[in-house]
Amino acid sequence: METDVGRSILAATPDSNGSLGIAISEAVEVAAKNDDTKYALGSVLNHVLLHQTVIGQEAIKQLEMANDYPDVVVACTGGGSNFSGIAFPFIGAQLRGGKKVKVVAVEPAACPSLTRGKYAYDFGDTGHLTPLVKMHTLGSTFIPPGFHAGGLRYHGMAPLVSHVKELGLIEARAYHQTTCFEAGVFFARTEGIVPAPEANHAIKGAIDEAQKCKEEGISRAILFNLCGHGHFDMQAYMDYFTGKLVDQKYDEKELAMALSGLPSVRAAA
């Protein structure tokens, strides 16, 4: 209720769960209305992705120390900065003639921009205050259901991540949250680290890749990004253990409506 964008969205959908797209709109509005306030976008845009690649660069150095190199790289994807941070340095090395690496982007089934979205120009925020970017999108007006991995509840995917998906350099998978939490609990009991709900998606992807190795009788090095701890997500784990955590499904009609409202962009003459 503290911004024009927020009030307009609540007027249309009083029970709205919010989303990252809405948060961006509200942040941009606050910055635009206050001369002493600036706004630096922390995800999605290409400069953020490139900044995050220090993660993958460090991973390459660490693997050199271990005299190893990944066959598979896995990370969760919401806006794309975490995924690109770990994966892009390995993709870059591959494009420069290095070892071919299987790169897997794991997203929530309730907000599947890479696996269900359209590759098109769209607004990066719900209130249409940002420039248009070409990306995999579910439509800027699409509001994901309220699943626990809040950091992955974004209608679009970073332009660079979308581009490498179109080039066939990465593959995308979508998982529901209960199977991801199951993987996260297994990881916590095995490694002694409680992962964040977002990170559980990457863990699920890594476990599936390990199971494939076991089934095929092939040894592969699997690198995944444990991008956050779950110390502030205990309620989500409590919901999981008490059976209150359910798989959320998006509304197909809402998705179709959001995609039908994509901006019409014409090429310059």
Image (spheres, grey):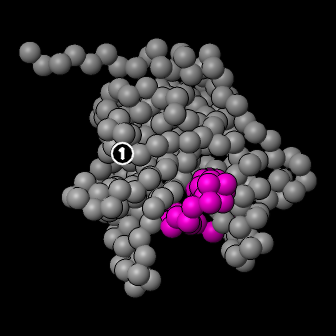
Residue drawn where x is 42% and y is 62% of the image:
86
Residue drawn where x is 77% and y is 56% of the image:
182
What quarter of the picture does the C terminus occupy?
A: top left
Say if the magenta span includes residue 180.
no
Residue at the disc numbered 1: 169
Amino acid type at image mark 1 = Leu
Q: Can residue 142 be seen in this view?
A: yes
Q: What element carries label 1?
A: loop
Image-quadrant location for residue 19: top right
Q: Where is residue 126 in the image (x, y as percent from the top left)?
A: 47, 32
Q: Is residue 18 visible?
A: no
Determine whether, in the image, residue 70 is placed left or right of residue 149.
left
User: Which residue is at the far left?
Assistant: 269
User: Which residue is at the far front?
Assistant: 217
What quarter of the picture does the N terminus occupy?
A: top right
Q: Where is residue 85 in the image (x, y as percent from the top left)?
A: 39, 61
5, 33: nearer the viewer: 5
Q: Residues within 10 Å of mark 1 (few under 14, many from 20)?
A: some
Residue drawn where x is 29% and y is 50% of the image:
46
Say if the magenta span includes residue 211.
yes
Number of marks in picture: 1
Q: Where is residue 256 in the image (x, y as percent from the top left)?
A: 54, 16
Q: What stretch is highlighted in magenta?
A: 201-230
240, 75: nearer the viewer: 75
211, 35: nearer the viewer: 211
User: Which residue is at the far right?
Assistant: 242
